[in-house]
Amino acid sequence: MTIAIFLLVLFATMTVGVPIAFALMLTALALMVHLDFFDAQLLAQNVQAGFDSFPLLAVPFFILAGELMNAGGLSRRIIDLARSMVGHIPGGLGYVVIGASLMLASMSGSAIADTAALATLLLPMMRKQNYPAGPSAGLIASGGIIAPIVPPSMPMVIYGVTTNTSISKLFLAGIVPGIIMAIGLVLVWRGIARGKDLPVAEKTSWVERRKVLSGSAWALMMPVIIIGGLRFGFFTPTEAAVVAAMYALLVATLIYRELNLQRLYRVLVDASRTTGIVMFLCGAATAASYMITLADLPSQLAQNMGPLLQSPMLFMAVVCLFLLAVGMVMDLTPTILILAPVLAPLAAKAGIDPVYFGFVFIFVGCLGLLTPPVGTVLNVVAGVGGLRMEPVIKGVTPFLLVYFAMLVLLILFPAIVLWPLKLMF
């Protein structure tokens, strides 16, 4: 009965258009009434406790770092570097998208920020050189979701705080899969480019390449500082976010000098607005999570899913199918906040490594960013490029199929995620 009330209230409120944060609070309220435990003060305290968390400080600073990168010229220089290296290959701008996606992902951790930067700078170039609009937009969207996979990743921070999983280990778990994603995109784009008569840009001289590399060196140092500092214990993930934001600010204002006070004010406003939305979601989710724990929902679900818990691989397959369905109608952050506290304890009972489960959870949630009808990243690309959604969906399909194949490999071979952790720890 408790499970039914939880699901009914949550999905009924979302269906009628109630914002996710308020839907979560109403769900917590419904569980309180059902358990005869109504206490408005307790509800307010849990909402406040949800964003009064030191590890969650990483979220606003990574958001700020991403905004500073885009406004301060760091993102543009990374894209210029990739273009100078591979832009002359047939279909070269597609490879530029993939290389820039991987490099930007190691700096911002935000799929939306990276996708917006790539679409703004590269989609007009691809259109000018008569690249097919659908596959080009699909490639940019597919490259954008590498950002939540490789460190630093904001969804991993939120998942780690929500489920008490090591954020540093989640970060390191994403390095190898992120590279595999990029390789998969290269293979698919190569097949697409081979069947098209795409223009070839003039090869950049080594003198020009050295100049572009020198200009982007300060931007390239950012992931080295973040990942190196985490690996060798110089700072925590939260402190890494502060370092990233301060480094981006200093480079944008003192070295590249592309960020004046007026633009900095706009950056701070945009970052604050996004932070407010995410933090309110975290607070509402904490209230719902408290009531989920009080109602003992994980144990009730474990009883209903008893046979699945005996087979970790079957459990993972079922959970992934469920998350894929949820991802079609819900964004990644609310998916983590709503479902991670329920599913993570079940995974532990099934004997699944918490870091591996957390990574797969986030990976599947990222696929939801590419699937209609919500498809947040698809909407960003379509909006920036002024494209209809139909060609974007069609263009992203081959890349999405590769990601689905990768998901099957992750389920069958958990060592893809766990092997780097064994080397590091």
Image (cartoon, rainbow, N blue to C red):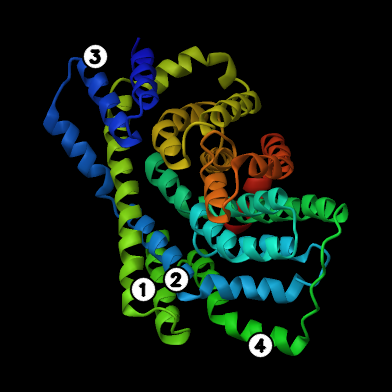
Which residue corresponds to the image point at 44% horizontal and 38% vertical from the top-left? Answer: 336
Which residue corresponds to the image point at 59% horizontal and 30% vertical from the top-left? Answer: 320
Mark 2 vs mark 3: give the one in front.
Answer: 2
Ranked by sequence position, the earlier of labels 4 and 2 is: 2
Which residue corresponds to the image point at 38% horizontal and 55% vertical from the top-left? Answer: 59
| Corner quadrant of residue 114 | bottom right
Local SS, label 1: helix
Ranked by sequence position, the earlier of labels 3 and 4 is: 3
Residue 45, x across and y down, in percent: 17, 38
**Label 2 belongs to which residue?**
71
Distance Cα–Cα, label 3 vs label 1: 50 Å
Ranked by sequence position, the earlier of labels 3 and 1 is: 3
Mark 3 vs mark 1: give the one in front.
Answer: 1
**Label 4 belongs to which residue?**
211
Q: Residues within 10 Å of mark 2 (few under 14, many from 20)?
A: many
Q: Amino acid at mark 4?
A: Lys
**Label 3 belongs to which residue?**
34
**Label 1 belongs to which residue?**
263
Q: Residues within 10 Å of mark 3 (few under 14, many from 20)?
A: some
